[in-house]
Amino acid sequence: MILTSIGESIPAIQKNKNTDKDYRINQRIRADKVRIVLGNSVDQSSDSTVLSLNEAINLAKEQGLDLVEVGPNQSPPVCRILDYGKFKFSQAKKLKQAKKSQVKIGLKEMRLRMRIGQHDIDSKRKQIETFLKEGNKVKISLMLRGRENAYPELGVEILRNMYSELKEYCEIDKTPGMEGRTISMIIAPK
């Protein structure tokens, strides 16, 4: 950290908010000698040369580009000559695309009671269907009170009936089991 006259600290390496990795550029590279990789992409057969840091920076400045350290853990560190602004932009774009392509599976919960009417079961079933079609897992919990605790098999029967009505949309992820005063089952979309 570098301290300014006001007492604030400025990081020695600027963090890029859009990418996970920090890159040292030009004068911030700490090594005496660096390996310069020539070629634009990893796919191409790349040539590399080892130069002193000053020679490499001068070579990059002649081309109007920056010297970027892409492999700091190598000996000597691997650097590329490229436009740092475009490089940061492309890295941020790749990261954003990777986040967009990730599939997030949520867990929704539906609570039932032992003495539930048929109309309520139908409306809860429709709601569970929409959750499953969206790609979410659903935890169906049946809460027991008082004397209902003496007959957990009736609760399990209600959950099995619910599953048999939803069989075409889902599969059982966790079979019905007691968790304290509740019987729960998790179903996942097919």
Image (cartoon, rainbow, N blue to C red):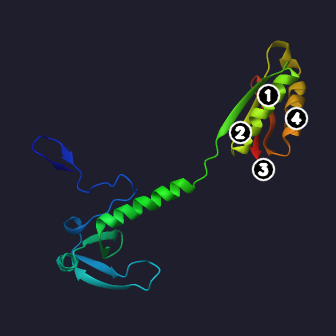
The answer to which of marks 2 and 4 sits earlier in the sequence is: 2
Q: Are marks 3 and 2 in contact (CB under 8 Å)?
A: no
Q: Is residue 120 left or right of residue 98?
A: right
Q: Amino acid at mark 4?
A: Arg
The answer to which of marks 4 and 1 sits earlier in the sequence is: 1
Crowding near pointer 2: few (<14 within 10 Å), some, many (20+)? some
Q: CA distance from mark 2 to mark 1?
A: 13 Å
> Can you give x and y, in whole percent of width and height, for residue 75 in the image?
33, 76
Q: CA distance from mark 3 to mark 2?
A: 12 Å
Q: Which residue is mark 2?
A: 131
Q: Is residue 167 left or right of residue 79?
A: right
Numbered disc in front, either 3 or 2: 2
**Which residue lies at the image location 52% right of the left edge and 58% below the top edge?**
98
**Which residue lies at the image location 50% right of the left edge and 58% below the top edge?**
97
Q: Quadrant of residue 120?
A: top right
Q: Quadrant of residue 25?
A: bottom left
Numbered disc in front, either 2 or 4: 2
> Can you give x and y, in whole percent of width and height, for residue 172 in the image?
80, 43
Numbered disc in front, either 1 or 3: 1
The answer to which of marks 1 and 3 sits earlier in the sequence is: 1
Q: Which residue is mark 4?
A: 160
Q: CA distance from mark 1 to mark 3?
A: 21 Å
The answer to which of marks 3 and 4 sits earlier in the sequence is: 4
Under circle 3, the secondary element is loop
The answer to which of marks 2 and 1 sits earlier in the sequence is: 1
Evaluate whether residue 124 shows in this view: yes
Numbered disc in front, either 4 or 1: 1
Q: Which residue is mark 3?
A: 190
Crowding near pointer 4: few (<14 within 10 Å), some, many (20+)? some
Q: Which mark is residue 123?
A: 1
Q: Amino acid at mark 1?
A: Ser
